[in-house]
Amino acid sequence: MKDTLKIALSKLKHIITTNILMITFVITTIINGMIARGMTLGNAFDIKPMLADMTAALLVSIFAYLFRPKNRFKYFFLWSIIFCLVCLINTIYYKNYISFASFSLLSTASQLGDYTDVVFKNIFDFKDLVYLWQLFCLIFVHLQLRRKKHYVEVEEHEKRKICFLNMIVITLISLGFFMSMLTGTDISRLKKQWNRGFIVQEFGIYTYQANDLVSYIRTKVNSMFGYDEAAKKFRDFYGEKEDDTKTNAYTNIFAGKNVIVIHAESMQNFLISDDTFDGEPTKINGVEVTPVLNRIAREGMYFSNFYAEDGTGTSSDSEFTFNTSLLPTTIGTVFMDYFDREYVTTPKLLKELGYTTASMHANEASAWNRQNMHPSLGYDKMYFYKDAYDIPDDEIIHLGLNDSSFFHQSVAHIKELDETSDKWYTLLIMLTNHTPFSGITEWEEKTGNVFDVDYKYEKVNEETGEVEQLTAPFMDGTILGNYFKSAHYADASLGEFIDELDTEGLLDDTVLVIYGDHDNKIKRKFYNRFYNYVPETDSVKKEGDEGYIQVDEYFDELNRSVPFIIWTKDMKGTKYNQEITKTMGMIDVQPTLGNMFGFHNKYALGHDIFNVEDNVVVFPSGNWLTDKIYYNSAKDEYRQIDLNSAITLDYIDYYKKYSEKALEISNDIIVYDLIKKVGENPNNELLEEVGEPSGQKKN
């Protein structure tokens, strides 16, 4: 027995000493995977993804034994670069989108030209380069082995074919252990790929990225893959979908009125109503950041618990969801990859009611492929960039023409619509308040109109007894401080626009609809400074300090709420002048507006907010939100919002299934063009029978 053990240990020692480079590669790959999960999801030491990462590294290592020992370093080094990039890119991407990068995003690379400073100013940290240690470690080990003539010795005794086969066996054993830990839910979500956080959490970063590549190639090579199954689910879903055309107190209240939609870049609700300050608007030194939006919210119909459901397409995703009541695709972006599909949109439905439709933007039409997507959405006219706007250099802030000039010049276009059309609907896309909000400080210096974001306070001088006026840096010089400046400027520009429209008589029979397209993508640490600042010491409160506000992951997620306001000049004081606090998402806008204006989209996945009892907002990440809880799909945990409600497992299970179904159906509609190929195909009519509801609980 002792001799057998001795022989086994001797063989093990031989395997280790002759495969040092491979072992180094595998260990460093596993460690980097742990770091990536630790910096994103926080599950660095979970066994299952560690085992998945080890299996991935072993799988790659198999093919190293097709090369001579002295040439294996190049092979392992190349794969180390690839794996380091996978970790680095996903870590940076996660900071901005709370999700993971995808090969399907390659189509959006053209949109990054003007935004490279965003990455370095707002997202990138030098600590992200920690993954590069793997490369240096591999180089060090390689140099040591070469100095000791290790590769020469190995080549003299090694039988490559046997080593190759041994690596296959070892990899299969590792894979077997990993697969024994998988559940049916794990495999189902891996196949669907939409819940990226869950896949990384359970399968590791490398398996996630490999699976993403397979999904991307499968979609590109054959868009018909899985069509039959998707078409059946589509028919079943809409065949069972409850009739959602109920009338209510808001039915047709705006029928026949003109519509101006304001796409408010990066505006967030906490500027208008901050729950941390008992619903008061955000103020710096007693001055409201967004006084115009605050007034419009008070005078109109203000949805204070409203969320964008954007994914990787950010602004374009919100435009899409606003107009179609579908969720963004989980593969690529609709505007770039699926602009040629058939969608039932708000502009198209209003055109059926006799409206002329238009879109206006001071940026190039090629941004987010709007030159192709906007006609697909149903816009008759497009007023874009230099074809429609005078853009002198002294009127540019950061990415393009400033909002004030944009709005002023747009009034002439709206007057033209009003003079030539019986009824009209137009979208105006704002631009100035765009991340990283860096251009606003230069504009303030040039114009002299400065919105201070320092902290002014009074203090009694102990020696003289006099009250002194002091100033602390506060948000000055930070990206959040620049955001406040930029939002303040954009808000003032909106006020000028409303005043000019009123002067021209263009508000008399017009409904103004304002929505924030997404949050500002600013790191949590800046909010921690904002909410916990101590001006006397220019420091930030720590947990346990009096008055400390915890800015954790869930605070950050809930704080991403954006404004949605419906306003007319004569709404103030009427029964429609109210705050709606019910949880609502961008997907609910089209059905809600449809009831008010008299149109209906039978393929809408959202709901008229005034017809739904317990609404849910589904995010592309798989997370979801109701009035009661915020559910994190990747972590399978939730933060309770309504502390007076009992949260049951049935409640969570119901909305888990609903959110997965909504994401799946929406994605299938987009990818497989199901509205055109199935829904409107005379040979594939939808089921007429109405079964159990596929959606939520209705009034």
Image: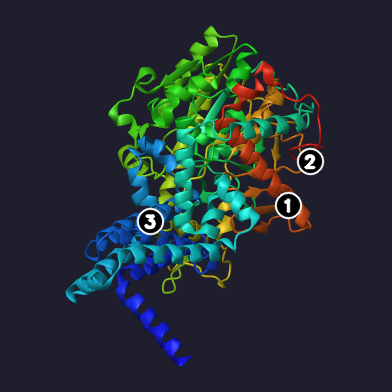
Residue with the mark numbered 1: 653
Between discs 1 and 3, the one toward the N terminus: 3
Q: What residue sits 36% from the left and 39% below the top? A: 112
Foreground of the two, 219 or 102: 219
Q: Circle 1 sits in a helix, a strand or a loop, which is it?
A: helix
Q: Percent from the top left, x then y, of residue 449?
A: 38, 40
Q: CA distance from mark 2 to mark 1?
A: 14 Å
Give the position of the C terminus as an image quadrant: top right
Measured Cα–Cα span from mark 1 to mark 3: 34 Å
- Give residue 88's mark: 3
Q: Quadrant of residue 199?
A: bottom right
Residue 314: % across, % down: 49, 39
Q: Mark 1 belongs to which amino acid?
A: Asp
Mark 2 = which residue?
Answer: 697
Task: Name the side, left or right, on which 120 lies relative to 214.
Answer: left
Secondary element under disc 3, as helix, strand or loop, is helix
* Three-letter amino acid code of the residue under disc 3: Leu
The reply to whether residue 559 is visible in this rendering is: no
Q: Residues within 10 Å of mark 1 (few under 14, many from 20)?
A: few
Q: Residues within 10 Å of mark 3 (few under 14, many from 20)?
A: many
